[in-house]
Amino acid sequence: MRRACVASDGMGKKSLGFVGLGIMGNHMAANLVKAGFDVTVWNRSPDKCAAVAGQGAKVAPSARAVAEASDITFAMLSDPEAVLGVVEGPDGVAAGLSRGKGYVDCSTVDEGTSRKVAELVHAAGALFLEGPVSGSKKPAEDGLLIFLCAGDRELYDDPSVVQALEAMGKARFYHGDTGAGARMKLVINAIMGTMMGAFCEGIALAEKSDLDTAELLEVLSLGVMANPMFSLKGKAIVDDTYPPAFPLKHQQKDLRLALELARDQGIALPITGAANAQYVKAMSDMGQGDADFSAIAKAVRGGDKKK
């Protein structure tokens, strides 16, 4: 294991950075501010910094500047291209890292991308931890995310990282070497994506069969299939409304990466593949990429719900 002890400011909590202030990141950074951390932020679209800046965060002019100003920098970005784009280059995070610093990437990416980021971070003398999360907008807002970590154990055990993860989440796991967190997140999101597809198919079948969908949702809530996702999304699907908590384009990206992982492992995932095709249809043919991932219901129904 690499040894590059994260420096302490001698006063308890370390200074933190946060890059990527989208649907998830803005709430995660806000919870760090609320927890009393000195937080510096940056986003590719500067206007997205306004909300957390209004709560007390400092705004930096670049990702590099965030890393330079912070003992530990967190990131929450949309896809592998964004992750590498923010880390690499003269204005990237890696350019602002040095010995004694740490980088925690909470984005959902493939193992290869995570390992590439780890190499760049280690080359700068810093420590790396991947920490993709299970949870969407509301858990991010409420500080109830689940962190699936892997990488440098020393950074995972750092007291300020522990405090930061506790401020943003309700649970954290350490899965081992870099890449294990990425794999775990893809497995979880493959399950979630296929569950949502089956849920939407069941609702569509009930609608076509002249059944009361409210009663369907109640029956599901009382049995062994009861779960928070069905409770949270069911009525909106019935109403054919999809305010984005987890954008469909990101769910489809995660299914694509899960299928790539399956190919690498030599196993077939036919159910996941079928679900992915429906997400692709909802995104590409129906323009639902920015809607919530439950908008797969439009692909299942073949368009808008018939009133």
Image: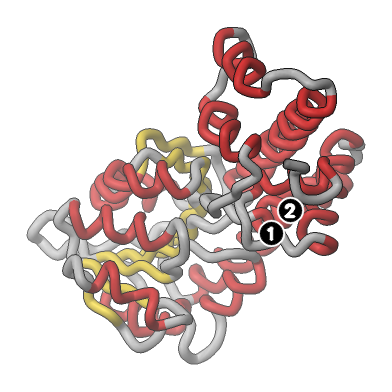
Density class for disc 1 (Cα within 10 Å; few <14, some 14-19, many ≥20) is many
The x and y percentages for residue 44 are 47, 81
Residue 249: numbered disc: 1
Whether residue 296 is situated above or below residue 210 in the rendered picture: below
Task: Check the image and name the residue furthest to the left.
Answer: 11
Residue closer to the observer: 21 or 69: 21
Residue 71 visible in the shown view: no
Give the distance between the C-alpha atoms of the residues marked 1 and 2, in whole angstroms: 5 Å
28 or 123: which is nearer to us?
Answer: 28
Q: Is residue 92 left or right of residue 258?
A: left
Q: Residue furthest bottom?
A: 90
Asked which quadrant contains residue 39, the reply is bottom left
Measured as percent of width and height from the top left, residue 245 is found at 52, 50
Where residue 270 sits: x, y (%)? 91, 36
Q: Secondary structure at mark 2?
A: helix
Residue depicted at 58% across the width and 70% down the height? 83
Find residue 304 and name its label: none
- Hey, which quadrant is residue 38 in on the image? bottom left
Rendered image: mark on residue 252: 2
The amino acid pointed to by label 2 is Gln
